Amino acid sequence: MIEIRNVSKSFEDSKAVDNVSVCIKENTVFGLIGTNGAGKSTVLRMLAGILEPDEGEIAIDGLPVFDNPEAKKNMFFIADEPYFFANANATDMQKYLTTVYPEFAVEDFYHYLINFGLDKKRKVNTYSKGMKKQLALICGICSGTKYLLCDETFDGLDPVMRQGIKSIFASEMEKRGLTPIIASHNLRELEDICDHVGLLHKGGVLLSKDLEDMKCNIQKIQCVFKSNEDEEKAISSLDIMKNEKRGSLNTLTVRGNKAEILAIFATVNTVFFEALPLSLEEIFISETEVVGYDIKKLILG
């Protein structure tokens, strides 16, 4: 488990991270969402022990991470722009990483290189941005570490490659309990992979919730009521987060579990009724609007 407790970090007069507290459970995919400048990369670098927090504590499996090789051996950090040795090829990187990570899976490494079409003898500095990202991800996956810290992991990868990496993550999680922590500015990229998402804004955590709980406790309902009385009765009984009405069609975002909401609608008359699944984007829009923020401006552009 990774515990971030009341962590703050400033650079000169600029506060990059402001009193962040987050708990990341093992064998889950944690998504760290936020616009550019929200503090995502700084949080990941403190998690990796590259930066020391000005305030607060970060512990990995109970061990403080900064300046602690025992804690760091359990993680692999992939920066937004991965670093490789000058003039090195993939084989050179494998040989070096094997000395750092005793559990490095050499056979899997070359298997993935073939599958991703990466030449093991070609100098990495001649790779495209996407190819460098692929190689960095392969190195991280094969390192054998428990935690994989990824900064803008899927940026520069085409859709097929993104799905391939997500499949490998799922396989490694099942096989050895890998815990990926993925920072991204794109909410849609993480929708189909994350178990838990934290939203960073201006250096602080605006929201941190389990996705399954969020999906179970927020429902989207489209309906046409038979009468004004039916509409008033239903709306007064529901915990409505958002109500959009176009003509006679109501689109309601309602807090509560599905069974309870269906039971309320069973007591009123409707001409049309439909319960719809919510996307991660819709859930976050609803949750952040409740606390006074517009995520569409923060993340969706």
Image: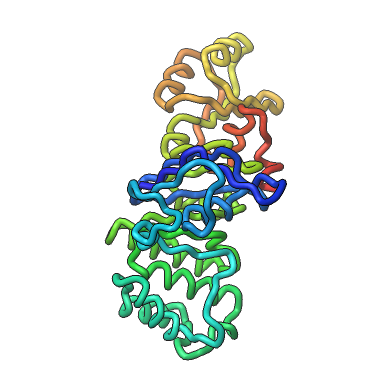
Return the residue found at the far left.
Answer: 175
Seen at 53% across and 77% down, the residue is 84
Residue 285 is situated, as x and y percent measured from the top left of the image, at: 61, 37
Q: Name which quarter of the figure residue 102 lies in.
A: bottom left
Residue 1 drawn above or below residue 74: above
Residue 165 drawn above or below residue 272: below
Residue 267 is situated, as x and y percent measured from the top left of the image, at: 46, 13
Return the residue found at the far bottom.
Answer: 121
Residue 3 is situated, as x and y percent measured from the top left of the image, at: 41, 43
Q: On the picture, is 293 further left or further right than 141?
A: right
Q: On the picture, is 140 further left or further right than 251?
A: left
Seen at 60% across and 23% down, the residue is 224
Seen from the viewer's position, the closer of residues 105 and 155 is 105
Residue 127 is situated, as x and y percent measured from the top left of the image, at: 57, 82
Residue 106 drawn above or below residue 271: below
Seen at 40% across and 49% down, the residue is 64
